[in-house]
Image (cartoon, rainbow, N blue to C red):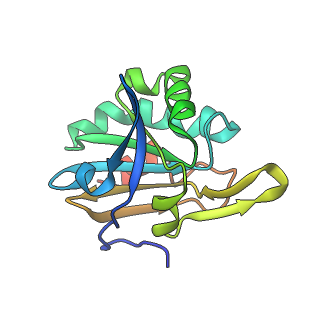
Amino acid sequence: MTITTGDTLPDASVLTMGTEGPHAVSITDKVKGRTVVIFGLPGAYTGTCTSAHVPSFIRTLPALREKGVEEVICIAVNDPFVMKAWGDATGAIDAGITMLADAESTFTTAIGMSFSAPPVGFVNRSKRYAMLVKDGVVTILNEEPGPGQCDVSGGESLLAAMG
């Protein structure tokens, strides 16, 4: 079942790169008592993800913070080494976006956002979405209708939905 507005995020362990290498991060710990934006996308270094989705959140990060967002998190079904390198290459990490790897698609599958497209090498990848989460509860969810699109799930659309 796909998560929807009003639902509480399930806990899942994802990975980040620290100074000592990869380490696990609990989604519940990331969102408890906080206002965060989580955006998911099919994969690091892929076309729309690199040229549109991540840049939209780099552009809107200051305005999101003005509206009370404490952290913007990008999640993809990739390994933490790739997410770190991609975050560095796009400027996302320097901008202040947290890059998390859902290496086994645990979180993505738990929220019902998984899809596969074997002809292009995507297996259990993430659909494109953006959500505003307050103390673990999804208050806004913008899911993209197609894999190559980045309209409703971009930073500007989420910012507009926040009013």
Q: How many marks?
A: 0
115 and 82: which is toward the camera: 82
Please identify the residue farthest to the front as the structure is shown.
20
Picture quadrant where residue 123 is located: bottom right
Left or right of 149 in this view: 2: left
- Look at the picture and state if 43 lies above or below 116: above
Please identify the residue farthest to the bottom as the structure is shown.
1
96 and 80: which is toward the camera: 80
- Look at the picture and state if 160 lies above or below 12: above
Q: In the rendering, at what x and y percent does residue 59 appear?
A: 43, 30
- Look at the picture and state if 19 lies above or below 62: above
Left or right of 8 in this view: 46: right
Q: In the image, what residue occupies the spot 43% across and 43% down?
A: 15
97 and 150: which is toward the camera: 97
Q: In the image, what residue occupies the spot 61% across and 33% down?
A: 50
Picture quadrant where residue 89 is located: top right
Q: In the rendering, at what x and y percent does residue 127 appear?
A: 59, 58
Please identify the residue farthest to the right as the structure is shown.
119
Q: In the image, what residue occupies the spot 65% across and 33% down?
A: 45
Q: In the rendering, at what x and y percent does residue 118 appear?
A: 80, 58
84 and 126: which is toward the camera: 84
Q: In the image, what residue occupies the spot 56% across and 54% down?
A: 128
